[in-house]
Each structure stands twice: as structure tokens, then as C-alpha cells.
Image (cartoon, rainbow, N blue to C red):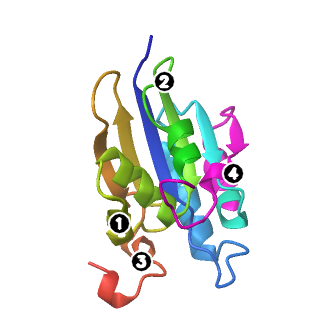
Amino acid sequence: MSEVRHLWIARHAFANEDESALTGDGEQQATLLGERLAGVPIAEIFHSPLPRAVQTTALVAAHLPGVPVRAAGELDDQLPTQANSAAMIERFTGPAPAETHQLVITHAFQVAWFVRDALEAPEDRWRGLNSCPTGLTLIRYFPGQKPRLIMFNDVSHLPAALQWTGFPPELRP
């Protein structure tokens, strides 16, 4: 029997130029994301193996004591295609054996690909979706129904100064 999967997806926090570590702003973003998610019954956290996602996950997980944390190679920062993203979609989407809330901390490309997949949009449509650092997306997968995009790139947990870090002025609202 299948139940609802609540897939919470977050882009990693703001990283330094060489992407080897979070900046001070990034650490603050990740901490605020953890505080935001503290009231959600997250059962598992999965993250990209890259340092910026690992650091983000550690700061978020500090607010979710006892929740298992696992690296997932499928969430690596690569340009998505139907072929190389199939394992990511297979592992993290669709109804679950029991109702669950899972958190995935990954990269902008992968966030956009999850959304594109849920909306059944053409493969080339993911490139127009930009996610802020620690922008939060929620997709629900119900048995026998199409996925529902509940929210995309929600940054209400961040003060205005931290919402669009790293984005050039022409891409900011």
C-alpha cells in the first residue's frame, strides 16, 4: 500500500567563490532553514556529497535531532538530463510505503529538475527555474494522483538581505 510522500527540497546555502565552504551569510541561511524546519516531522535528510551541501545539512540537522542524515550521490551538482537524473527521480519521488516527510538538500539544477518532473514539463524547461540559497520547495506525491507542487523557492525564513545572495540584480525581484 502506498502513502503520501512530502518531499521537501532545499538548495544548499550560499558558498564562497570556489564552492569549498559556506560563507558567513550561508551559515546564517542554513541555521535559519533548520529553525524553519524544526516543526516539520522530517523522517530523513538526504544531501549531495559536495561540501556546500554537506555543511548546509549539518547546520540544518542540528535543529532536527535524531533525524538520520545520508549522503546521496544522485543529488550531485551535474547538469540534469532524463538519463543522468533517472536515479534521482526514481529514489526520491512518487508515493512512499508509509506517509513520510523527507528533506533533500541539493543544488539549483536538481531543485529545478524535481519541479520540472513533477509538472511533467519538457526537458528544456528546467533551466528557467532559479532557486535561492536555502530556498525551500515542497512537492507532495499522492498514490494514484499527479504530484502537487505546494511551494517553490520559499525564502520566508530569511531576512531580505539573505534572500537573493549570489544573484545578479537582473535576476532579483
Residue 140 horizontal/vertical position (percent): 36, 35
What is the C-alpha distance between the residues marked 4 and 2? 20 Å
Q: In the visual, does 148 lie left or right of 57?
A: left
Look at the numbered disc 2 and give the secondary structure of its residue.
Answer: loop
Task: Kindly indicate whether the residue at mark 2 contacts the one at mark 1 (C-beta within 8 angstroms).
Answer: no
Residue 158 horizontal/vertical position (percent): 42, 64
Residue under label 1: 124
Residue 113 horizontal/vertical position (percent): 43, 56
What is the C-alpha distance between the residues marked 3 and 4? 32 Å
Residue count near mark 4 (Cα–Cα under 10 Å), binned few <14, some 14–19, many ≥20: some
What is the C-alpha distance between the residues marked 3 and 1? 31 Å
Look at the numbered disc 4 and give the secondary structure of its residue.
Answer: helix
Q: Earlier in the sequence, mark 3 or mark 4?
A: 4
Examine the image and state in which quarter residue 173 appears.
bottom left
Question: Residue at horizontal 69%, vertical 34%?
Answer: 68
Look at the numbered disc 1 and give the secondary structure of its residue.
Answer: helix
Question: Residue at horizontal 46%, vertical 37%?
Answer: 93
Q: Earlier in the sequence, mark 1 or mark 2?
A: 2
Q: Nearer the viewer, mark 3 or mark 4?
A: 4
Residue under label 4: 73
Q: Amino acid at mark 4?
A: Gly
Q: Nearer the viewer, mark 1 or mark 4?
A: 1
Q: Earlier in the sequence, mark 3 or mark 1?
A: 1
Q: Earlier in the sequence, mark 3 or mark 2?
A: 2
Residue 12 horizontal/vertical position (percent): 57, 62
Q: Is residue 80 magenta?
A: yes
Q: Which mark is residue 96?
A: 2
What is the C-alpha distance between the residues marked 3 and 2? 37 Å
Residue under label 3: 161
